[in-house]
Image (tube, rainbow, N blue to C red):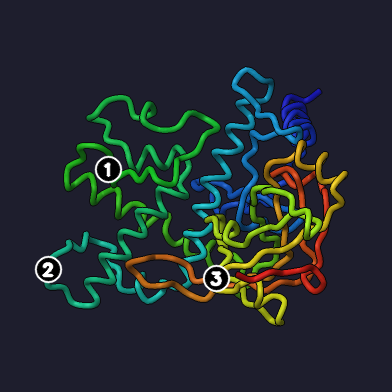
Amino acid sequence: MDQRIWIVLLLLIQIVVHGQSPEMVFEPPSPDFISLSLQTHEGKLRFGNQDEYFLKSDGTYISSRDDGYFETDKRSSHNRASRHAFVELLKMRFKKEMFDAMDKTYFTERRQNMYEEEIKSHTAQQHVLTLANALCNKTQSVRLFCNPKEGDCTSVFPKDGYYNEPRNIKGWGGRGASEFQKLRAYTTFVEELFPSVEQWADTLYPDNTLEGYYVVKTQLEQYDFKAGGYWFHTHQFHNQGFLLSWHDLQPVNSSERKLLHPNGSSLLLQMAPDKAEDFSEKYQQIFLVFKVSASLNGLENYRADQLKTTFALDSSIITIYSDDSLTSKVAEMDIGSVEIKTR
């Protein structure tokens, strides 16, 4: 059997074994950049809480001694880098004016009194550095962010199959680089690679709308015998996740508005006591899935550099799973008929 086919089969086996959905891959316009691999659910993008990869459907974790650990670890590394890079690319469409003002020949130094165009140029150059760190493959990263005078370049970059961590922003030219090395690395990226990055960004959801599923994780609390079920409190939905947050929800009816009550609200999953006892022994946390349409609405501001997003529910049905890979469905709730309690 061809070695490449065998490797693909092994990866597919790992996905099936651990119940993980196939990922949506965005191929780069050039081999100089990494591909973006984003999690999905039922063929659409997954927002909010993400699959942690290492949690199996039975509640146990993949350990470093298990077969397939390193492939899972690499997949997790790729996904973290992909989510960060994807968001950085989406931001670019709202920074056209800033990038137009960017000095592509020299660094715009920060000082106390700056004209507006200088502020835009300086800010754009900082964002370009973030983009280069997020998107460049290992070969280009070594070229742009490693100073050969400091020793072995490859040792300061992730091993093959792993990706740069989003929080790890390397400076132009690498550690100890001179002002000449820094400027050379910057102008190299801007002249040779940045045009392709701009084109790539323009191809990603150009109408600023994305369809997918918003996922929240909640803890299973005490059974309410009087109400006959478990309450899910919306204050637990405010965890930070990929692209969307719970406060981005735009309600369109009274039931949805109850979900966003300023004092918080709770949804009742009705369940008979005999079933609930078995349920509580099996599960400590569960995952609620909402089918949504999301919109990109610009940036908060240049300083915060946060995308403004909103989303609307495409279905009143909330699907409930017991695992973060969303393979073990345990219940459904209809927002239109479920009991919602506000505080």
- Residue at image x 54%, y 68%? 202
Q: Position of residue 18 (x, y in %)?
A: 75, 34
Instruction: Answer with left or right where residue 107 lies relative to residue 222.
Output: left
Crowding around mark 1 (Cα neighbors within 10 Å: few <14, some 14 to 19, many 20+) is many
- Residue at image x 30%, y 53%? 186
* 66 in relation to 86, above or below: above
Q: Residue furthest front?
A: 226
Residue at disc 1, secondary structure: loop
Q: Residue furthest bottom?
A: 253
Q: Position of residue 102 (x, y in %)?
A: 30, 68
Of badges 2 and 3, nearer the viewer stands 3
Q: Nearer the viewer, residue 142 or 131?
A: 131
Q: Residue 128 appears in which quarter of the rendering?
A: bottom left
Q: Say whether marks 1 and 2 touch (CB < 8 Å).
A: no
What is the number of the mark on residue 112?
2
Residue 206 visible? The answer is no
- Residue at image x 57%, y 63%? 244
Q: Position of residue 270 (x, y in %)?
A: 82, 58
- Residue at image x 22%, y 72%? 118
